[in-house]
Image (cartoon, coloured by chain):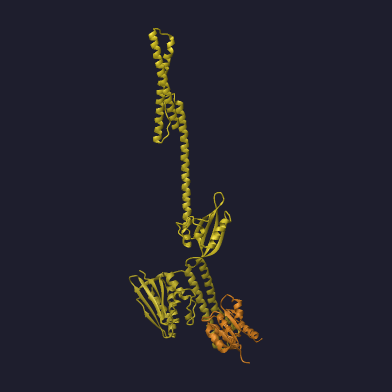
Amino acid sequence: MAAKKILVADDESHILHVVSLKLRNAGFEVLTAADGQEALELAQAQRPDLLITDYHMPQLSGLELCQKLKQDPATAGIPTIMLTARGYQLDPKDTQESGIARMLSKPFSPRNLLTAVNEVLLEAAA
Amino acid sequence: MKFVMETLVRSGKILSILMVTCLVGGMLCSIGSLHSLWSSGRLDLGMLGPVLFVAGGAAGLLAITSFRRNCRILIEAIHRMTVQGKLNNLQTDSHEIRPLISAVNDMVEAAERCMSDAVLKMKELEIQLKVATSERQHAQAIIYSISDAVLVTDTFDELVLANESAARTFQFDLEHSRRAPVEDILRDEKLVEMVRDMRQSNSKTGRRIVEHKIKGPGEEKIFKVTLSAVADDNDAPAGVVTVLHDMTREKEVAEMKNDFVSSVSHELRTPLASIKAYVEMLIDGEADDEKTTREFYEVIQNEANRLSRLIDNILNISRIESGLVQINKQPQSLMVILKEALEVIAPQARTKQISLVEQLTPAFYQTSADKDMLYQAVLNLLSNAVKYTPERGTITVQTTVDEAKRKVITRISDTGVGIPPKDLPFVFDKFYRAEANNHMAKGTGLGLSLVKHIIETVHRGRMFVESHVGKGSCFGFELDLSD
């Protein structure tokens, strides 16, 4: 079975690096994007199995990215894990409507992130 | 008194006419009798009656003359009192009118007592009026000096008193608004309703505090409105005092504080997130070779430094803002400080092949400065210039001295990306980062805010910035030369 493809979007290069490494070590294929716009283009072109995105990004925020993906039938089914450094919770309505499966607040544990990735992929397969 | 005198005079006249008539009658009778006596040649005792009558008439005439004289004296004395405006006791030698004089004198004394009582009362009232006037002026002065808007309305909801702040807030003419209906003054339906409700509540000492937004000529303002019912001396409701405290700025400051806290926590979490993630990766053995392990350690170290810098900046800004920072100002050569900062930044500039150009005035020009702080400010500006200047660019550090104005001006110009005009007014704001240049470098958005504080708050200088997108930016500051 081919490795699952995961797109990681974050403007913090260290975070991007550490998340990619954790996922690659766990056997996933990883794509990276440094802002929302780049992530949107990559998602449309590569159709990843899962998106991990930061909320606070230049050009296009994490939420706007999810909403755009949801509008396009080709990318609407991609489940998302949202990372946020902000102390607030997103509106549950936004979360549901944008296909956000999990929310992890920064600082986060790569270990917990990996667990969440596996759970979301299992849910998506079911 | 006048009436008494007139009656006296009038009755005196009638009496004298009567007496004179009797006297003349008596005389005619006596002459007639004497004549018949003479002609008859007998003179008897029966003739004595008319003689006595004549004598009585003469005595009466004398008495009338004396009475009239006394009356005149009395009138003159009373006239003198009227002219002099002074009440005096009347004197008389005549025992005939003594009881009258004594009665008049009693009356004069009673009148004098009444008058002195009245004068005393008047003085008392004058003092009370003065006290009341000064109290009123005092109260008005207090009301006028209050920066909050104050409006006093009566039981008819008409304006009794207002201060300038109220006139400014509701834009009415203070001088011509007395007795104006409150709805003409306030022009805010809800507020008018509040005043009316308070008045109609018939409360004597009631108080109500509400937060209320009022749309002014400019922006909407938020007021804390305090409505107090006022009672008169008889404890009956007399009106309403309305005080409006402008809370707009306080709210803004509270919002800014909230934004600041939320920005700080966001900025602190970002490096912390990296540190935590990398440490966990090391613990979990995810870095499988020495190169990766070393890379992880370096990331942790850099992010820890970033965190520490961030905390330093936040603390420095807050210390400067609250005036708690210890400032050690000494005469310093700005050029020496600039040279030191240039030496420190040179390695970073070299890696990007950026040339550093110095155009400095001689070192003997001195300025009163806190060396560490000024060095920090210059280093921040130079570090920004290196960050936002592409490879092989140029950074020029120039100082000029204005001998006439006793000022030294420092300019740090680069050939970098420049700042979009829409961002330029905000570059010195805390946590503000021009989005267009976000990709160029990591930053906390606190560096320039700190620089501005160091130049303007600590050194009473002036900070300025000029920038053109694609051409470069010039950050500069002006400081006073020390004597």
Extreme bottom residue here? A1
**Image spot of residue B66 (x, y percent):** 40, 23
Up-down relation of residue B124 to residue A114 (above or below): above
- Image quadrant where one finds the N terminus of chain B: top left
Left of B227 or right of it: where is B75? left
Position of B385 with respect to A104 (left or right) is left
Picture quadrant of residue B382: bottom left
Residue placed most toward the observer, B374 or A84: A84
Q: Is residue A31 above or below residue B423?
A: below
Q: Nearer the viewer, residue B32 or B222?
A: B32
Vertical side of B179 occupied by B273: above or below: below
Q: Going by the picture, which residue comes out furthest to the right?
A: A126
Q: Is residue B96 above or below residue B437?
A: above
The image position of residue B335, as x and y in percent, is 38, 76
- Image location of residue B350, percent across then percent down: 43, 85
Identify the hue of chain B.
Answer: yellow
**Residue farthest to the left, as pictured:** B404
Q: Is residue B21 visible?
A: yes
Residue B364, visible in the rendered structure: no
Letter of the orange chain: A
- B178 or B129, nearer to the observer: B178
**Quadrant position of the C terminus of chain B in the picture:** bottom left
Q: Nearer the viewer, residue B26 or B126?
A: B26
Residue B65 pos. (x, y %): 40, 23
